[in-house]
Amino acid sequence: MRKLLSLTLAIVMLLSMATFARAEEPVVINMFISQPEYADAVRALIDAYKEVAPNVTINYETTQNDYPTLLKTKINAGECPDIFATTSGKEIGVYLEYSYNFADQPAAAAMQDSVKAVMMSGDEVHGFALKSNYFGIVYNQKIFDELGIAEFPATTEAMKAACETIAAAGYQPFSTGFAEWWVYKHIFQHFLDAASPDPEALVKKFIAGEATFADYPILYNNFFDFLDLAVQYGDAKPLETDLAGEESAIGTGKAAMILGQGAWVEGDIKNIDPDFNIGFKGYPVSDNAAQCQVIAGSDQAMRIYKDSKVLASVLDFVNWWYTSDYGKAWFCDVAGVIPPLKDVKAPDMQIIQQGDALSATKGAAAVSVSYSTDSFHQAFGEILQAYVGGTITKDDACSQIEAKWVELEGGK
């Protein structure tokens, strides 16, 4: 559990923000979002807001597995949550008819421009972020130092050699998290960014049925070779290892690297081993070390239901979250994430510090998961789970993924 802001400090901040509490009659806000790794932090935020607005009750529900399907089920049943989550970017348009444009609200003005850019439809703002983020490979620096691997492998061949060295020393090179469908999209986006100088345009070509994996060797060869390497040097039962399994494997010193993760895992790893020395780098996607980059940006959007019966109270909560002293401090001091706000300090975390340094020296690649919707990404992950499980071939996986892009994204 991440270290929470002290109760005394919270009370001082909350008392200073009493002007946000408008509701005089009891109000219930229903909040359904993904990212359960932040459940403790979100509950702390809700508890803090209860001190500001005692008449407001926030029913918080979170899940990761099958989130897109569950959200659609709620919407189709006429039970759209007052606050819900989607992917940023393309998915902003998919749920546009359900989301409120809060461009004139203080929360929109407080957002970093780079974050706001992936939350917009035209001039309208239809999303806000729980966090900005870094994506890459998280690794155990102690193991790399012990084995004399002075430089993190930045090319595909160097990664193969590193895995051989790590395995020979008795460590498990990877823990993969392949039981989670969303892990695959986090890995794939690194290869997608390297496959084209304009990955967004490339995704549009896939959606239009005008591109295939075979057209792009980094996708057809390098990406699948990496999955094969991860299975070869990974968990004994890769389709049974989830996020918690990855964190346990690396935190206890069993595995040298974990895949599909980012800054959000640091707190849990440190809870296992407070002295853990975290390393963080991009994925080796080719024989060009310059393409081994971290990814920076915000891939998730929180949405406000435009027909919410308690819209004014929802806006009060979101504006308080983004502009109050407690709300602004929450990102760093409670959630331990990169704040999506202007001029707000970032937490003192190794992954964030290394991500900042790598972005400054090598640049950061695009959050290309935002070019497709989570409905596609879930299907994508399930297809790759079948590939990892050995029930379909690489060519089967490629053709099924290409078909899903057209089926689920075409015309949207």
Image (cartoon, rainbow, N blue to C red):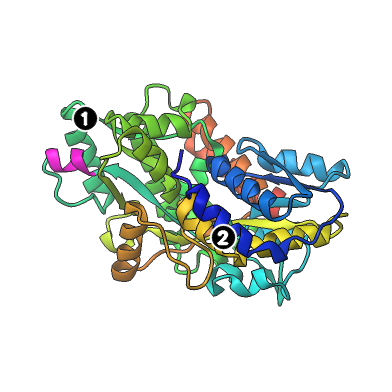
374 displayed left or right of 393: right
The residue shown at (45%, 43%) is 2
Cα–Cα span, label 2 and label 1 = 51 Å
Specify the farthest residue to the top: 236
Closer to us: 100 or 158: 100
Q: In the rendered image, which residue does mark 1 sit on?
A: 167
Instruction: Locate residue 294, reporting x and y percent.
Output: 37, 58
360 displayed left or right of 44: left
**Dividing the image into 4 quarters, which one contains the C terminus?**
bottom right
The residue shown at (24%, 37%) is 163
- Amino acid type at circle 1 is Ala
* Residue count near mark 1 (Cα–Cα under 10 Å), binned few <14, some 14–19, many ≥20: some
Secondary structure type for disc 2: helix
Mark carried by residue 145: none
Secondary structure type for disc 1: helix
- Amino acid type at circle 2 is Met
In which quarter of the view is residue 364 placed?
Answer: bottom left
Q: Nearer the viewer, mark 2 or mark 1?
A: 2
In which quarter of the view is residue 109 placed?
Answer: bottom right
Question: Magenta segment, which residues?
Answer: 141-146
The residue shown at (29%, 63%) is 290
Up/down of 139 relative to 83, above or below: above
Q: In the rendered image, which residue does mark 2 sit on?
A: 13
Residue 292 can be seen in this image = no
Residue 142 in the magenta stretch? The answer is yes
Up/down of 206 relative to 165, above or below: below
The residue shown at (50%, 55%) is 9
